[in-house]
Image (cartoon, coloured by chain):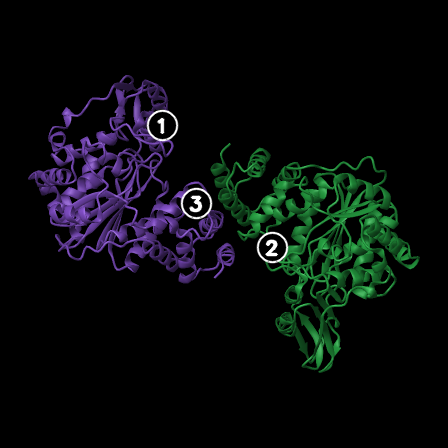
Chain colours: A purple, B green
Amino acid sequence: MNTVEIIKKKRDGHTLTSEEIEFIVSNYTEKKIPDYQLSALLMAIYLNGMNGRETTSLTKSMLYSGKVIDLNRIPGLKVDKHSTGGVGDKTSLIIAPIAAAAGVNVPMISGRGLGHSGGTLDKLESIPGFRINLSLIDYKNVLKKCGAVLIGQTKEITPADKLFYALRDVTATVESIPLITASIMSKKLAEGIDGLVLDVKTGSGAFMKKQKDAELLSHSLMKTARMFDKKVITFITDMNQPLGHYIGNWLEVYESIKILQGEKIEDLLTVSLNLAGAMIYLGNKASDITEGIEIAHSLIENGKAFDKFLQIVAAQGGKTTLIKNPDKYTKPKIVERIQSDATGYLTNINTYNIGMAAVELGAGRKTKEDKIDPLAGIIFKPKLGDKIKRGDVIAELHTSNELNIQPAKELILASLKISKHNLHKHKLIKKVIQ
Amino acid sequence: MNTVEIIKKKRDGHTLTSEEIEFIVSNYTEKKIPDYQLSALLMAIYLNGMNGRETTSLTKSMLYSGKVIDLNRIPGLKVDKHSTGGVGDKTSLIIAPIAAAAGVNVPMISGRGLGHSGGTLDKLESIPGFRINLSLIDYKNVLKKCGAVLIGQTKEITPADKLFYALRDVTATVESIPLITASIMSKKLAEGIDGLVLDVKTGSGAFMKKQKDAELLSHSLMKTARMFDKKVITFITDMNQPLGHYIGNWLEVYESIKILQGEKIEDLLTVSLNLAGAMIYLGNKASDITEGIEIAHSLIENGKAFDKFLQIVAAQGGKTTLIKNPDKYTKPKIVERIQSDATGYLTNINTYNIGMAAVELGAGRKTKEDKIDPLAGIIFKPKLGDKIKRGDVIAELHTSNELNIQPAKELILASLKISKHNLHKHKLIKKVIQ
């Protein structure tokens, strides 16, 4: 087999065989194919696409570029959730303990923040002592003991995906459905799961701005999951405004604690209950999603979900005193309130820019080398459709560096559209695909 | 400016500005943009194309990546020819002396063989002593003295093109009309020409198999040439069979000598007279192409074209005794005749494979490191439409290595279609575009 001939084939719109895809993935991972050939092929895939069979082959080759974790010795079904990412999207922290409290095993391998979107690992690291780099043995032990474990991608898992992703990021080949599918599914399949709940976000703060694209990605992900005989349920959910009110690493842990302690933050609670409900159903602990949601709800009400969260944090080395009393956490050096300069209804939010404002404040990275400020972020008050008066506090900015305030403030104010007349709200859960 | 944003723009089908193209070309030439980013952009250009303005900008940026030769001190117009390449295509060796004998300056910078297709430089180097690596001063001196000079691309000329070409070759991005256009035109414009005759080949032995593609390329080349205020005439000519009968380096010099000495090898003579006629016209030495062809014809008849060839060879250090008596050239170690195994009409030739058979015999390179055997090649006897009897000699193979014979023989026999009924012949000169 010959790399140039394989590039030509995809360039000319033909279908690659499993052998050709395996040749590319394994040789690139072993550094026998140079970056410049893979990037030409990635652009050809971006522009000419891949069919379901090719996407499955690519997923398989990426999956077997590394170790596939075997969780068969742990009794019960293993179910995870994956979100395509958004602003204020902290549901992983909430639903992992809920599902585990319901008796479902949740072996969760998460990522870091990317661009405007936060990452579960960065959030967990804001809990003093919390270890996200467990060995595979510790990973299994925590899962066995607690029913849930939250770690980062290890070196052994899908090394091809790491290499592909780094190249895609610098060659404008990120937003390709087959490439996204193979990247997500290979990582999730490597965890050793039986079922997967997908939260595909759409709207101004999502990677897929249009619902049509979110649906295409959902179908590709589900088709691939089923080729590997995994049960899968997809929620297409709204990302036209931040989820909940808190954006930033510790701020999102804080809001998750509040939800687990029974606070009713409407949109965040609704999405969390739905996702957790679906996980409980896929884990065979409920007869349908509705029953799963009821169970999830009662596990919050009776305190068992919060207890489970404390148990997981403790098992991974985190300080539970701060989880029990989150208001005792270190305070941010600078807190600045932004007031509205107009009166009317909030009809539109450029949620991407709200995420970027949080990055400006120190909650995310602009370059790979940037260090994250766990305290930095935004408490974003209003929701779409709310009536706002001139002078109302819209957001509270937290940061350690005064210089970050002005650019973040400008970004946020420019992101809001305040109109005379109210518009219908976006539907929160747009679609459930089983 | 940002490389990823430029790749995205072309990926999404938008038009690049001159500044963006210049940013890419100059930074890549200075090794500030890595190969993997350029190859992603090249694939996006391959698949989404470039308009005329972008192609002109790319040509300009490549042209000014190096030195543009100034020939203003040499009186008279400077005209060159470029062929897109084929099998047995030796017209450069014939028309450069004809046009020079007519008083046109021919500053010809040529290339090496590529794949199945021969290169003027490799042919010239089969003449003992002939120097193709002249300094720019010697280049100008030979041109001034002889009216023609034939050299290879120097380091100073279009370095960006060399780097781009090397990357395109290994990333399946060669056959792109805007990229081919910029590559050809930047090199030709760097020579300091006033006019250019293009020989765009089409057929089984050409890079453009279909006439439609050859015409698209012709229009792109001509449009770009005119943006630089150069006069240009294009011939679209047939490459469904070798041009003339001789394929290989010294073999093609030999056949060129025969043409210059007045031998009537029909197709080769016709194409050569047309190209030379157009050069003479563009050089203001004839009032139209027809008159140019008449002048070219008479310069062969009166021996002046051959004398001019001798003068050029001598000026560039070549041994003229062998040009005067080409039959005194070293003989090939092995000569093998192939006979037809069928009776009928020759209705089809896979000319690409005939070229590859010559490469097998040692006339071309399979890897960059291969050394060329100047004696190797094929004397290919029949023309399309000829009646062939079983046992007739079809070809004579020349080589220094006996092991080359069998693969070459098999390639040639498999390339011929001999049928009961004759088919109409291909038109030799398919189109003249002025």
Image position, residue B285 (x, y; %): 88, 46
Numbered disc in front, either 1 or 3:
3
Residue type at tag 1: Ser
Within 10 angstroms of label 3, few (less than 14), some, or many (20 or more) residues? many
Could you say whether the residue bearing mark 2 is in a helix, strand or loop?
Answer: loop
Residue type at tag 2: Lys
Image position, residue A192 (x, y; %): 23, 54
Residue B204 visible (yes or no): no
User: Label 1: which residue?
Assistant: A415
The residue at the point 62 percent across, 45 percent down is B162
**Residue B368: which numbered mark, if any?**
2
Asked if marks 3 and 2 fall on the same chain, the answer is no
Image position, residue A186 (x, y; %): 31, 52
In the rendered view, does A339 fall on the left or right side of A71? right
User: Label 3: which residue?
Assistant: A173
Q: Distance between the residues labelled 1 and 3?
A: 27 Å
The residue at the point 9 percent across, 42 percent down is A298
Chain on which label 3 sits: A
Of marks 1 and 3, which one's residue comes earlier in the chain? 3
Residue type at tag 3: Thr
Within 10 angstroms of label 1, few (less than 14), some, or many (20 or more) residues? some
